[in-house]
Image (spheres, rainbow, N blue to C red):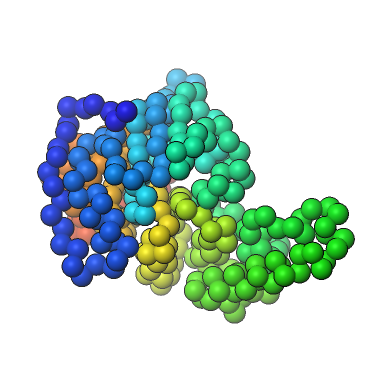
Amino acid sequence: MPANTGNTTNTTNTTNTTNMAPGRAAAVEALRDVARQPGSSKPDPILIADHVSRQFGGLKAVDVAHVEIQRGAITALIGPNGAGKTTLFNLLTGFDKPDTGEWTFKSTSVAGKAPYRLARMGMVRTFQLTKALSRMSVMDNMLLGASGQSGERVFKALLPFTWNAQERANKERAMELLGRFNLDAKIDDFAGSLSGGQRKLLEMARALMVGPEIVMLDEPMAGVNPALTQSLLGHIKNIREEGTTVLFVEHDMDMVHDISDWVIVMAQGSIIAEGPPDAVMKDPQVIEAYLGSRHGSALTADGASLTAESQGGTT
């Protein structure tokens, strides 16, 4: 059930969707009447988590009572360093085990499932530090992301005619994605020879090989050359336009404001605010969590203080 807090706001989002891309317009419209409060119910959640907690010694890194992620929207998960954002990602995607909690993906309980099983179900993630296999080619990295490959089975591997067609289809899909991400000229290069930004693009493209229903991006802009920033932003928007849900952790507040349909804010392991970007960035609790007593500082692109304060460190 949604958390019941004293900071409940039901103000309707009056954003004009006329000039928006169809995917964004649909997401904004779906979220228009959602209460701006921690743990608010969504009209069509793809991911729901309840009472998820994780403690390291005396530190409670995550203590989330309830959170829902709207299907087909781009949701940003923000918060100061140490808020528990990446830890929550790790828990939901099976890379860490919680002390307590249950969560569902597409109405199916997935708590405790291994990451590869979640990927087969349509939940994939990227990492703050890219996981490209450096001594394999860009194309081989892409092919590793394809699921259900018949040639991976011992006996079928000896019978190429049983999987050649699937291999050709996977390569065509990989080439299409690499072309979209401007990496098609790099197919035979080692992944380790790519720049940091290109490795981010490769990891995102590889995630899409699965045909996911939700993509979870952990600080996609971290370490990216500014020249590639707009390209990455465009790709994330395109993922939503194709009907895929996006949940991402990010410190770059300009990016959050630009592409997010909904923002969830964490502090000290708990969710303290939710809402559209403009509303969240004016929320006194959010300003206090980021800036403490300097609560008069701006949180938007007009004042870069939030971005400056929150760069670096663990999340």
Foreground residue, 56 or 38? 38
Viewport quadrant of the C terminus:
top left
Q: In x, y percent, where is residue 269?
A: 37, 31
- Left or right, residue 23 beside residue 18: right
Foreground residue, 294 or 254? 254
Foreground residue, 210 or 309? 210
- Residue name at image x 69 percent, y 72 percent: 168
Q: In x, y percent, where is residue 185?
A: 59, 79
Q: In x, y percent, where is residue 85?
A: 40, 40
- Residue name at image x 82 percent, y 66 percent: 160
Q: In x, y percent, where is residue 294?
A: 17, 41
When the figure is inspected, residue 246 is found, relative to residue 81, above or below; the finding is below
Q: Is residue 141 visible?
A: no
Viewport quadrant of the N terminus:
top left
Q: How many marks?
A: 0
- Residue name at image x 76 percent, y 55 percent: 152
Question: Residue 49, located in which quarter of the rendered image?
Answer: top left
Q: Residue pushed farthest top?
A: 58
Question: Residue 207, located in which quarter of the rendered image?
Answer: bottom right
When the figure is inspected, residue 48 is found, relative to residue 160, above or below; the finding is above
- Residue name at image x 28 percent, y 59 percent: 26
Q: Is residue 179 visible?
A: yes
